[in-house]
Image (spheres, rainbow, N blue to C red):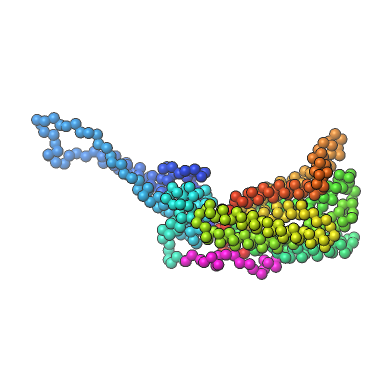
Amino acid sequence: MSGLGELDRPGPPEGSGAWDERSEGWLSGDGDEDDAGESREKGSGSSLPDRASDAPSPTRPAPVAAPSRKPLTARRGAADPVKGLMHRHRELCERAVDPLEIAAALEAHGVTDRTAARFRHRNVFSLAEEMYARVPRDGDTPPRPAAPDVIPRARADWALLTLLPGALCAGTVVGLRLTEGQTRLFVVIAGILAVVLALRAALRRGPLSPHGRTRAGRHRTGGRTCWLLAYAALGDGVLRAAVAGGPDGVPTGVGDGSWPLATAPLVALALACAPAAWSAHLFAVRALRRLDSSRGLEEFAASVQPLLLGTFLLFLGALAALTGLCAAALGEPAGHAQTLTLGALLFLARLLTVHGFTHAPALVLGAAGGAEAVALATVFAGRLPGCGFLATPVDALLAACGPAGVPALCCGAAALTLLVHAARTLTRASAHARTDQPC
C-alpha cells in the first residue's frame, strides 16, 4: 500500500482523542495561509483619506473616531475540512485501488470514527470514499473490482502441499517402528529433513504464507517452534524419568522404553497442517466479504470477531479428531490436552504472522518454550543439596495432572494470550488489506 509514510507526520494527536482546531489546521494546511493573510491585512490596515470632504472642518473639532474592529471571517478550511487532508495524501488516494484501501491505511495509523466525525463524516469508511472520489487521476480510473474477483480462491498446488507434511511424518513413524539400529537412525534423520522441507514449502504457498507482508529475518519463530515440537515428542518421557531419578539412557523410539517417544502428537500436528490452511483460507475469504459489506470500523470488527472464534474452533475440532485417530492407529495415549493447546498456539501464531503481526507470536512462542525448559530445569536442579524446594511447583503439578500438565499449562496460557491479541488485531480493516498474490 503506497503513500502510507505521509500519514505518519508529526502534528496530529497520537491517540484517539478529539482533534482540536490546531490539529484540523495542520490537516487542512490553512494555518500558514491564514497567518499570511493576517500579515497582509496588518500591513494595509491604515490609509489616508482620499477626499477633501473627509477632512475635519477648521471651525469644528474633529470627532473622535471609534476604534476600528476587523470583521471576523471564517477559516477557509472550515467550510471544506476534507480538502486539506485530500491534498496532503494525494498520492495515496491516486494509487488506491478502492476506498477500502484508503480506509485501511487511515485506520492503521490511528484515525478512528471519532476522528472522522471532525471531518463531518460518520465513520472512516465514509471519509475514505470522499477522498477516493474527489482526487483526480491520470487517465481512466479502473472500475472497482467485483467481490468474486478479489476474494482469494482455493488452488490445487497449496492444497496438495498442505497434505505432504502429514504424509511424510506418518511414513517416518512407520519406518521408525519397522527398523532397528543404525538403519533406524538414518530413517529418522531422513524423515525429519523431509518433513521440515515439506512444511517449509507449505508455509511459503497458499493461505499460510504472509505474501510479503513481513520482512525476512524479523521475528523468526522456527527455532521456538522446533523446541515446542521436540518437547511434545520427548518432554513427557524425560520429565517422568527425571522425577524417578533418570533418565538412564537415550530414547529408543518405542513406547515401552525408559524414555518413551510420543509420536502420535507429532503425526496429528503434521496432519493438521491441511485443516489449518483451509481454516486460514476460510477466515480470509469471509473477512474480505465482511470488509466489502461493512460501512464502519465498529461494524466490521463486530462481524469479524465471531468469524475468528468460529474459525479457531473449527481448527480445534479437526485437530481433536486427528489426535484421536493417530493415537488409536499408533497404540499410544491420545494426550488431547497437550496436543490441542500446542496446536492452538501454533495456529494462532501462524494466523497472526500471515496478516503481518509477527512480534507477538515470536514473543509468546518464546515464553511458552522457556516455561517448559524452566520446568525441566527445576526438576534436575531440585536434586542438588538444599535445592529441593525448586522442584516443588512441578512436583505439585505432576501430582495433580501428570506430566502432560506442564505443556498443557504453558501452551494453554500462551494460546489464550494470542487469542485475545488476535481478537484485537485481526478485527481491524488494515489487517485484511488485499495483496496481488493470490492464495
Q: Position of residue 358 (x, y in %)?
A: 64, 52
Which region is colored magenta?
Answer: 143-161
- Report whether residue 356 is seen: no
Which of 72/188 is in front? 72
Residue found at x 68% / y 67%: 159
Compared to 268, does 22 lie above or below? above
| The quarter of the displayed image where residue 70 is located | top left
Q: How many marks?
A: 0
Q: Position of residue 325 (x, y in %)?
A: 79, 62
Compared to 339, does 391 lie above or below? above
Compared to 377, does 336 lie above or below? below
Residue found at x 43% / y 42%: 20
Quarter of the image for the C terminus: give it.
bottom right
Q: In the drawing, does residue 256 fall left or right of residue 157?
A: right
Q: In the drawing, does residue 62 fall left or right of residue 110?
A: left
Q: Position of residue 97 (x, y in %)?
A: 50, 62
Which of 91/326 is in front? 326
Residue found at x 46% / y 50%: 116
Queried whether the magenta region covers residue 74, the answer comes back as no
Q: Residue furthest bottom?
A: 156
Q: Position of residue 67 (x, y in %)?
A: 24, 34
